[in-house]
Image (cartoon, helix red, strand yellow):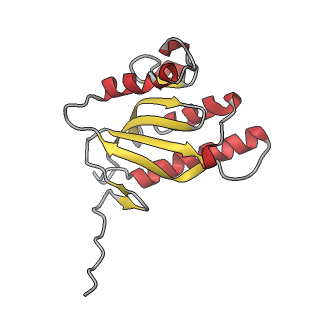
């Protein structure tokens, strides 16, 4: 007997990996470049700009780190006018789609920029978003790209760079 497939809960979507979100909970997200292509340094700031575009409108961006071939970010989706939470699928589609168009235009190229899938997980209640963002900001140091976090040009933290440095 064939079992019926389970439908994802409202606010969730499914591709190869399940994408589950909970109202008011911070979500850790990683998305990678297509075929692990190295993003030229000249366009990495564009990615941050697109991540900030709907900050405090559709989600609160706690922080973002743009690595050479992937991006880490922590967001908390906000509520829409009807009281529902903005979905991760919509948020990620807008960030990845707009940034891909900008990157391709800036580089005078065509083609895929991002892999379709992204990895995400809800932070546990004892995992504070600020501490997780600081941990993510250590990635460039751990990878040997810089000696100190603040030397890395392609990161943004809500409580450090804030609204004035978009």
Classify 124 as above or below 111. Answer: above
60 to the left or right of 44: left
Q: Position of residue 135 (x, y in %)?
A: 38, 24
Question: 86 or 80: which is nearer to us?
Answer: 86
158 to the left or right of 52: left
- Residue occupying image coordinates x 26% and y 80%: 3
Classify 123 as above or below 87. Answer: above
- Residue occupying image coordinates x 59% and y 37%: 69
Question: 166 or 125: which is nearer to us?
Answer: 125
Question: 58 or 14: which is nearer to us?
Answer: 14
Spot the residue most to the left.
Answer: 126
- Image quarter of residue 73: top left
Spot the residue most to the right.
Answer: 108
Image quarter in which the N terminus is found: bottom left
Image quarter in which the C terminus is found: top right
144 to the left or right of 126: right
Q: Position of residue 41 (x, y in %)?
A: 67, 28
Total numbered labels:
0
- Residue occupying image coordinates x 41% and y 43%: 58
């Amino acid at each position: 007997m064939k079992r019926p497939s389970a439908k994802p809960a409202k606010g969730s979507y499914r591709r190869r990996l399940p994408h589950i979100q909970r109202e008011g909970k911070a979500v850790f997200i990683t998305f990678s470049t297509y075929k692990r292509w190295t993003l030229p340094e000249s366009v990495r700031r564009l990615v941050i700009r697109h991540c900030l575009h709907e900050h405090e409108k559709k989600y609160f961006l706690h922080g973002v780190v743009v690595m050479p071939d992937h991006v880490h970010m922590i967001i908390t989706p906000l509520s829409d006018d009807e009281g529902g939470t903005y979905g991760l699928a919509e948020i990620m589609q807008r960030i990845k789609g707009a940034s891909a168009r900008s990157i391709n235009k800036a580089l005078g190229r065509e083609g895929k920029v991002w892999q379709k899938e992204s990895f995400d997980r809800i932070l546990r209640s004892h995992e504070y978003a600020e501490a997780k963002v600081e941990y993510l900001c250590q990635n460039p140091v751990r990878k040997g790209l810089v000696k100190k976090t603040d030397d890395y040009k392609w990161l943004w933290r809500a409580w450090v760079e804030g609204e004035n440095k978009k």
